[in-house]
Structures are given as structure tokens and as C-alpha cells.
Amino acid sequence: MTPTREELLKTAIYTGPHKVNSRSDNSNFVPTTSYLNLKKVFLKLKESKGNIVHVLGAPGTGKSTNIYQALKKTGLETCEVSSTLPSINTSPSQVFKILITDLKKNTGSTTKKEAYLKLAEYDVVLFADKFHDPHLIQDNLIGFSLWTRNNTLWPIIFYLICIKEYIQFHSEFQNMNLVFQTAWRLRLRGKKYDIFTQVGWLSRLLVKLLAYLFCVVEISYTPAETINIIKSHLKDIDREKIDNAIHKFGCRPRLILEYLEPP
């Protein structure tokens, strides 16, 4: 029997042997400097409210892997937001309305304010894979990352709507910790890029602006850390093969693992 939309959104997303989308699927996790920085930030969320954390990283660096592991180790009570869209052509205002409708449904609330108050009871409200990538579970689901990838400028309008909402319900959001797995995918010359990490000077400018306004943790690795991660999955892999893959893909473990051990 095909699972319903609601059943899919309640489950952890699993998209392959090297992409982690739940707290439980992290058996080969290797701590890195980026992870320790993220864990340090999360520990502070236990004692304070009103924080907004953006977790950045190029595709393949394992943002969700690090987020779920840090949440598990810090013991933060987390509500992960799930939502899907009816079409990649959904307008920004409609995207926001659907998000609010899903929030009210998932929290059993009748108003936005009631939903926000219920979310504030958690240590963390997380926007990660269940919000960004539900389309990776089933083809007829459309996640936020797929929408942004196909609508270059509309996300700007959506973010402005979110800012307006934050200002309007500022007192409610001040009692909430928000953690975003942050990505903004674009198509340029037929290729996909993350605007925060893969578009040169524009990425650096946007990250500086984001870091000025919010707490930003970027997931990235040294070559040595990347080698350790690869070897934790592929014990007997030849070092030269890893070096060649790093040269080809950079320090992005998931892409390297998919290249060295295709399904």
C-alpha cells in the first residue's frame, strides 16, 4: 500500500546509504571541528530562547548528519517541521500559507499564535530534511529545496514574508529557538549551485550578512577530516582513490562516497 502524505511526513527521510536524515542513522559518524562548533552552539540553546541558527554547507558535506548528531548528543527536545507543496509553480504567498496550515495541523492548533506558542515549548524548532527534501522520499511530493531550485527570485519574496511574520509575532518567536538547515539552490547554465557556498564572492557576501544578523555555523572539512570520514565507511579503500576523489569533488564526503561506492 502506498503511504499517505501524512505518514511520509511523520517518518525520517532516507535517500541512500550515505545521506543521514534522522537521529538514529548516524552509526559511522566522525566528529570534526565543524561538528564540535555546532554542538557548542546547540548546548547554549538549552539555557536560552529567541535564538536563530543557520547551518550552512555545500551539497554533500552532511549538514543534516551534523545537525541530527548534535541534537542527539545535546539531548535537545526538538520539533522538526514538515511541509510539502502542491506544485513547483506555487507562489511565495501560497508557500507560506501552506507552511502555516501544516504547522497548525501538526501541532493541533486552530490559530497561528497557538501553533507558535506550542512550538515554543520545545528546546528547538528545526527546519531540515522533512521541510526541504520530502520529494526525495516520493516523486509526487515537492519540498522547499525543489521549489527554490526552480524559482530563482521567488524565495526572496518568501523570505520577506517570513521577516514580516517574525516582526508581527516577535514576542512569540522570542520564546522559540529556530534552527535552519540553510540552502538556496539555483540553476545556472544548466548546473545546480547553493547560493550560500558555491557562487564565489556573492556567497561570501551573503554569509557575512547572515552572520551579522544570526548565528551561523558552516559545515566544512579539511582533507584529513574528509579522509577519516571516508575510511569510517570504506575500511579498505585505497588512499590514492580517496585523494583523487577529493581532487574531483572537494571535501564533500557524501559525493565522494557515492562516487567510490555507487549503489
Image: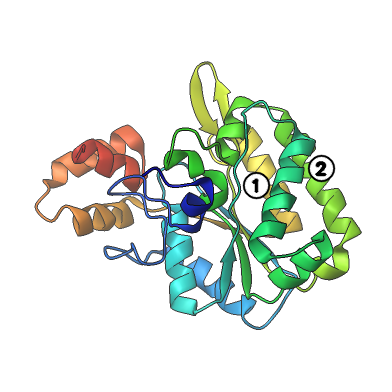
Query: Is 199 positioned to the left or the right of 34 in the image?
Result: right
The quadrant in which the N terminus is found is top left
For the point 28% across and 65% down, the residue is 27
- Which image quadrant for residue 254? top left
Between disc 2 and disc 1, whose residue precedes?
2
Query: Percent from the top left, x then y, of residue 114?
Result: 80, 67
Q: CA distance from mark 2 to mark 1?
A: 17 Å
Q: Which mark is residue 218?
A: none
Q: Residues within 10 Å of mark 2 (few under 14, many from 20)?
A: few
Query: Is 101 positioned to the left or the right of 113 in the image?
Result: left
Query: Percent from the top left, x then y, of residue 246?
Result: 29, 40
Query: Percent from the top left, x then y, of residue 172?
Result: 82, 69
Coloring basis for residues: rainbow
- Front residue of 145 and 89: 89
For the point 47% across and 50% down, the residue is 8
Q: Which residue is mark 1?
A: 207
**Mark 1: amino acid:** Val
Q: Farthest right residue?
A: 168
Q: Farthest front residue?
A: 1
| Res. 34 visible in picture | no
Q: Secondary structure at mark 1?
A: helix
Q: Secondary structure at mark 2?
A: helix
| Res. 82 visible in picture | yes
For the point 31% across and 64% down, the residue is 29
- Which image quadrant for residue 244? top left
Please tell me whether residue 213 is drawn above or below residue 156 in the rendered image.
below
Q: Which residue is mark 2?
A: 160
For the point 21% across and 55% down, the residue is 233
Tag in front: 2 or 1: 2
